[in-house]
Image (cartoon, helix red, strand yellow):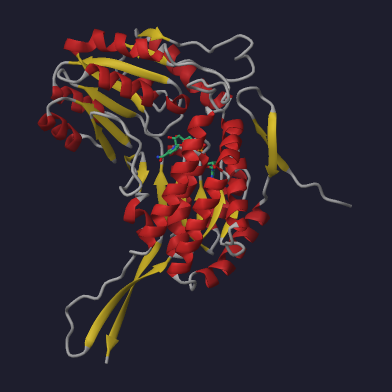
């Protein structure tokens, strides 16, 4: 009798249609993937760095060659406008190139304190099999942040993408094969986290878990990893504040906050979630935000619009719950606030850009991660008060400050409890600087040389000759 393979149906969040299927792996499949990656590691760690670097540049080229195809897959499984998906691919390919070059600079040390022919060599070794577990919202970016560093350092990787957006990762795995990566150096396994997660984390042949996702999932993974002494990097949730000082350039600040807060329909870990505006410019600033937010258009990824739908009902509900909670506690919804309906929207989870004014810290919108297009705004009277409000959060992924006075802005940046702070603009993050959170937003850093070092272990060799 033929046993039918179980599959996961991947749904287009714009219209509820199935856009593809992928295997629903079992614990046995997970164990086999890890064992295969471990066999591959024995050879991969001995491949010269020059060869690993060459292959990684080829993988980046492969991504560029298939950029349209990969972007379309992301657009269909995630619903994000196609232009943003193309940017995700090109930036991820650049990140692979960056890590490849940085891999050439990975070095050990020889300390100077030699005594009569004794010497110590400090060398770096790849740590082994890495399990990458990633969320739905930037499926390729968040994977390449781990993959590019791990592979060039000499580790092998088993990647488990989100069950909502696995198809782009599956295709990326094929591209790596096509450009010549040895079998099982980069292995993709698709399945539900709650079904195969514990095998992926606890298997004795796994050395490190590199996780990006929700804080609660991260806590569970961290606990399981700690019980088995596995190394971990945790990139978790955020609830990032932006402070707009009395002397800020209002046009610049409002444009940056609206653009960033509603990017990817608010499904963005370090998006601006809450805004504190000096009381003297508060009404003016809220009006400016509303004006800009109302210009944003929603629709399918291929319609030239600015925003797509929310990935699924569960994530969508955060926005509705936060709006209802804020209204009940006295806030005012200046724009948005209700699910869009009509022929274009009825089959997807379309929530418009929403600005909740007169918010305060009794409201969920100011304290809980939304992961949707809702921004809370409240006034403040002194810069010290703004710092206290910004830090009044269990999260610490990112923070933003807008002021024409560099001394004020720097003091705030230093005072914020956050892994990254942006002053007077909100850029994407650069490849050569570290990214990660403090408090409940995670531990460890990705990108830059720190990102690669996290996939190596130091070994000290004492010489006596
Ligand atoms: P999620 O935590 O629900 O899922 C993330 C991944 O974990 C998925 O692949 C899922 O299958 C897997 N998973 C779930 N349960 C598991 C278990 N028990 N064991 C092992 N794996 C398990 O997150 P999501 O809804 O896909 O993504 C949204 C969250 O991700 C938000 O909280 C967001 O802030 C966070 N995020 C953080 C960053 C960052 O860099 N800090 C970046 C993007 C997203």
Picture coordinates of residue 304, whole percent (x, y): 53, 22
Picture coordinates of residue 308, whole percent (x, y): 53, 23
**Residue occupying the far bottom of the picture:** 465
Residue at (34% x, 26% y) in the render:
272
Q: Is residue 288 above or below residue 272?
A: above
Residue at (58% x, 25% y) in the render:
302
Quadrant location of the C terminus in the rendered image: bottom left
Q: Is residue 385 above or below residue 25?
A: above
**Residue occupying the far left of the picture:** 407
Q: Quadrant of residue 439?
A: top left
Let me know if residue 87 appears in the view: yes
Q: Quadrant of residue 269?
A: top left
User: Relative to residue 345, is residue 334 drawn left or right?
Assistant: left
Q: Nearer the viewer, residue 119 or 67?
A: 67
Picture coordinates of residue 235, whole percent (x, y): 40, 43
Q: Is residue 187 above or below residue 313?
A: below
Q: Nearer the viewer, residue 249 or 78?
A: 249
Q: Nearer the viewer, residue 221 or 296?
A: 296
Q: Is residue 110 above or below residue 180?
A: below
Picture coordinates of residue 158, whole percent (x, y): 56, 55
Let me know if residue 226 appears in the view: no
């Amino acid at each position: 009798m033929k046993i039918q393979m179980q599959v996961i149906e991947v749904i287009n969040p714009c219209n509820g249609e199935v856009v593809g299927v992928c295997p629903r792996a079992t614990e046995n499949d997970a164990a086999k993937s890890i064992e295969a990656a471990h066999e591959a590691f024995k050879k991969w760690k001995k491949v010269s760095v020059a060869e690993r670097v060459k292959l990684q540049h080829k993988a980046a080229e492969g991504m560029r060659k298939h950029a349209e195809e990969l972007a379309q897959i992301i657009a269909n499984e995630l619903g994000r406008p196609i232009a943003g998906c193309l940017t995700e691919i090109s930036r991820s390919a650049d990140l692979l190139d960056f890590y490849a070059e940085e891999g050439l600079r990975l070095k050990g040390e020889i300390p100077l304190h030699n005594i009569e022919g004794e010497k110590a060599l400090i060398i770096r070794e790849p740590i082994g099999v890495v399990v990458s577990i990633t969320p739905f919202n930037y499926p390729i970016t968040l994977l390449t942040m781990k993959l590019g560093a791990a592979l060039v350092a000499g580790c092998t990787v088993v990647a488990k993408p989100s069950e909502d957006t696995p198809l782009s990762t599956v295709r990326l795995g094929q591209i790596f094969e096509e450009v010549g990566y040895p079998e099982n150096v980069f292995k993709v396994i698709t399945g539900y986290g709650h079904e195969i997660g514990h095998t992926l984390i606890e298997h004795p042949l796994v050395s490190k878990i590199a996780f990006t996702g929700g804080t609660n999932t991260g806590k569970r993974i961290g606990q399981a990893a700690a019980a088995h002494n596995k190394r971990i990097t945790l990139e978790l949730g955020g609830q990032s504040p932006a402070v707009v000082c009395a002397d800020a350039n209002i046009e610049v600040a409002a444009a940056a906050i609206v653009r960033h807060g509603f990017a990817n329909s608010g499904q963005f870990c370090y998006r601006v979630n809450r805004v504190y505006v000096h009381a003297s410019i508060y009404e003016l600033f809220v009006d400016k935000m509303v004006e800009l937010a109302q210009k944003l258009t929603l629709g399918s990824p291929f319609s030239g619009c600015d925003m797509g739908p929310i990935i699924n009902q569960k994530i969508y509900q955060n926005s509705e719950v936060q709006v209802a909670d804020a209204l009940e506690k006295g806030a005012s919804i200046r724009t948005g606030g209700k699910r869009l309906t009509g022929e274009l929207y009825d089959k997807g989870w379309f929530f418009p850009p929403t600005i909740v004014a007169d918010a305060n810290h009794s409201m969920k919108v100011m304290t809980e991660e939304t992961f949707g297009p809702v921004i809370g705004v409240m006034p403040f009277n002194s810069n010290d008060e703004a710092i206290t409000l910004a830090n009044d959060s269990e999260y610490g992924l990112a923070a933003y400050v807008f002021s024409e006075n560099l001394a004020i802005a720097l003091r705030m940046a230093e005072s914020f409890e956050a892994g990254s702070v942006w002053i007077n603009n909100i850029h994407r993050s650069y490849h050569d600087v570290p990214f990660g959170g403090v408090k409940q937003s995670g531990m460890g850093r990705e990108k830059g040389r720190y990102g690669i070092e996290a996939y190596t272990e130091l070994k000290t060799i004492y010489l006596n000759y």
